[in-house]
Amino acid sequence: MSERDLATPTARPQPGSVGVGERGRPEHRRLLRRPLGDRWLRVTSLIVFAVAWQLYAAPKNPILLPTPIAVLNAFVELVSNGTLVGALAGSFAELILGFGMAVIVGIGVGILMGRYHRFEVIFDPYVSFMNATPLVAFIPLLIIWVGIEFPARVIVVFLLSVWPILINTVAGIKNANRGLVEVGTSFGLSEVQLLRWVSLPSAVPYILAGTRNGIAKGIVGMIIGEMDMALAGLGGLVADFGDSFQTSKLMAVIFCTSIFGVAFVVLLNFTERRRFAWIKETAGSQK
C-alpha cells in the first residue's frame, strides 16, 4: 500500500443515510404518498361518522337529534335567506378585532416578561390572577361599564384569547438557548438584535401554539358575548334556535362556528409551513 493510499481516507456511507439508488427510491415514494394517504384517511373517517350519525338519528325524534341531511338542508336554507351570512359577518368582525388586539398585546407583553425580570415581577401577579379567573364572570361588569354593543363583545373576545398567547410567549422567550444568547452578547449584538435573531426564533413554536389556543378561546368568547349581551351574530342565532327547539338549524349554526375556528387553524398551519418550515425539521419525529 502506497503512502498516497494511506493519506486518502475511504468514503464510507453514514448510518441512516439514504442514497440515490434502490434505498432512496422507496423512501422518496413513501414521503410523496403520505400526504395523499392522510387526506384519504380524514375523508374516510368523516364519511363513516356521517353514515353512522344518519343511521342512528333516522328513527329518533328530530327535535332531539336531527339527521345530517336535515342539518345540511337547514344550513342551505339559512345561507339562501341571508340569515347566516349576516350573522357571520358581525361575528367575524368581533373576532378579528378582539383576537387581533390579543395577539399584539399578548406577544408584546410576553416578550417583555420573558426577557426582562422586572417586567415579569410586575405583571406576573395580574396575569396569574386573570388566567385563573373565570372571565365569563366579568360580563355583568362589562355590561355596566361598556354596555351591550359591539365594543363590549370585542372586549370579551380579547379577554378570553389574550392569556394563552401571553403565557406561551413568555415560556418561549425564557426557553431560548442560553448558550446562543451568551454567544450573541459576546459578539456585541444589541438587545434588539438578540431578540430578533435568538429569542424570537426560539419562541415561534410556543407563540404559534398559544395562538391556536387563543383563537379557540376567542371563538368561545365571541359566542358567549353574543348570547349574553345583545343576541347578535352567531351566538344570537344559537340562542334563538335553541329557545324555539329548531334543532337542525341550531346544529347548522354550531357546525358553522366550528368550521369558522377550523379555518383559522388551517390558516395558522399554512403560515407555519410557509414561513416557519424549520419548526418541523427540528421537532421530534412522529410515526
Image: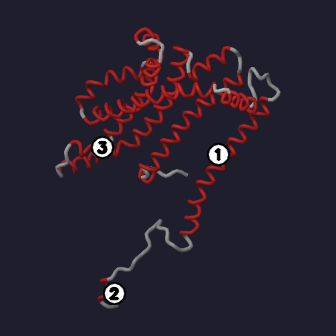
Mark-to-mark CA distance, 2 and 3? 48 Å
Q: Secondary structure at mark 2?
A: helix
* Residue 2 position in % (x across, y down): 32, 91
The residue carrying mark 1 is 42
Image depth: mark 2 or mark 3 in front:
3
- Marks 1 and 3, the one that precedes in the sequence: 1
Q: Nearer the viewer, residue 80 or 144?
A: 80
* Residue 183 position in % (x across, y down): 22, 51
Determine whether, in the image, residue 142 is placed left or right of residue 286. Answer: left
- Marks 2 and 3, the one that precedes in the sequence: 2
Who's the residue at 55% across and 64% down the image? 28
Amino acid, disc 1: Arg
Q: Nearer the viewer, residue 163 or 19?
A: 163
Tell me the quarter of the picture where residue 124 sits: top left
Who's the residue at 61% across and 31% down the image? 256
Q: Is residue 209 above or below residue 75?
A: below
Amino acid, disc 2: Asp
Who's the residue at 48% across and 28% down the image? 95
* Residue 76 position in % (x across, y down): 70, 31
Q: Residue at the right extreme?
A: 59
Q: Residues within 10 Å of mark 3 (few under 14, many from 20)?
A: many
Q: Nearer the viewer, residue 231 or 42?
A: 231
Can the viewer see residue 134 in this picture? no
Mark-to-mark CA distance, 1 and 3? 36 Å
Q: Residue at the front extreme?
A: 81
Q: Secondary structure at mark 1?
A: helix
The residue carrying mark 3 is 199
Mark-to-mark CA distance, 1 and 2? 57 Å
Can the viewer see residue 277 in this picture? yes
Look at the image and tell me in which quarter the N terminus lies. bottom left
The residue carrying mark 2 is 5
